[in-house]
Image (tube, grey):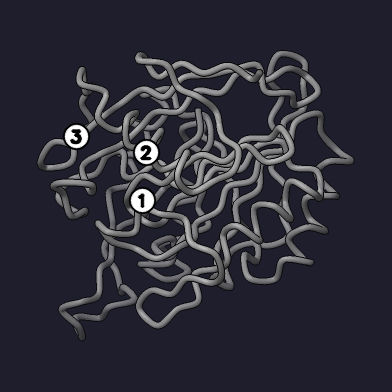
Amino acid sequence: MIANCEGTYSTAGPSKCGGASANCFSFQAPPSYAKALAWSGIDLVNIANNHSMDYLTRGLLQTKAALKKVGVAYAGPPNTVTIMNEDGLRVAVMGFSPYPWSAPLNNIPAAAKLVRRAAAEANIVIVLMHAGAEGANEIHTPYGSEYAYGEDRGNVRAFSHAMINAGADLVFGSGPHVIRGIERYKNHLIAYSLGNFAGWGNFGLGGNLSLSGLLTVRIDGTGRILGGRWQSLYVARPGVPRVDGANTSAHLVSSLSAGDFAHTYRLDSSGNFTGK
């Protein structure tokens, strides 16, 4: 299982905010809390995002050490391909964001070069991107570059398509804090945003901000999509994921996928889809 780690596992110390701005957010949990990731079945997290350096280099190093201690791999450092061995297959995972402490989202040729390197080393290639504008209304996947807080948060369509063209089998996105649609591009799956999953009072909730999904994708050893399932969730205060029996987020992702993309995967009433 893969997730985006939106914060640090670190001890008290200086943060990027320094108490200077009410609109600056620094996320931190004790390093010992990283064991919750392993307990919940998460095998790898993406640390290529805007909160990995909330507590500066010291906090990032502590986060990496905490993850290593509990046996959770991470992807996202510059020029780094993380290789995992699953059922006799080599799975390469890379994380990209628009920040210098991660692989480069906004340098598409450099990103594609890293993906080609991964494709030469592994059977399956997965790209994680932390990109796109933030907010309750950012549910559609636009064309062109997106901006938030004065930052260029990438051209998610151009980036994702380039990564598939370079050899990626799957692309998963985070960053907007809301659900976005799923595109079927050259028979590969791009999930542009799965929304928030869990936190503790650190994310805005309500409406679209509380809708979430657990996406399971079945693929064969060549990267061919066999099918999968979208499990509808909602994030209850103060930030705990709950199963949504009404399948609200599945209905939303189906609508967004059909409206935003020429090709997608059709979800049935339970959130299941096939690769056909």
Residue labelled with disc 1? 9
Say few, some or many: other residues with alpha carbon within 10 Å of mark 1 (under 14 / 14 to 19 / 20 or more).
Answer: many
Q: At which x and y percent is residue 85?
A: 71, 24
Kind of residue at badge 3: Val
Cα separation, mark 1 vs mark 3, equals 18 Å
Cα separation, mark 1 vs mark 2, equals 7 Å
Q: Residue at x 86, y 38 (%)?
A: 121
Q: At which x and y percent is residue 118?
A: 80, 44
Quadrant in the picture for the C terminus: top right
Q: Does 22 appear above or below 71?
A: below
Residue 147 lies left or right of residue 81; in this view the side is left
Residue 189 lies left or right of residue 133; in this view the side is right
Q: Secondary structure at mark 2?
A: helix
Foreground disc of the pair 1, 3 = 3
Q: Secondary structure at mark 3?
A: strand
Which of 18 and 113 lies nearest the eye of the viewer?
113
Q: Which mark is residue 34?
A: 2
Residue 246 lies left or right of residue 251; in this view the side is left
Q: At which x and y percent is residue 216?
A: 50, 23
Q: Residue at x 26, y 63 (%)?
A: 12
Residue labelled with disc 3? 240
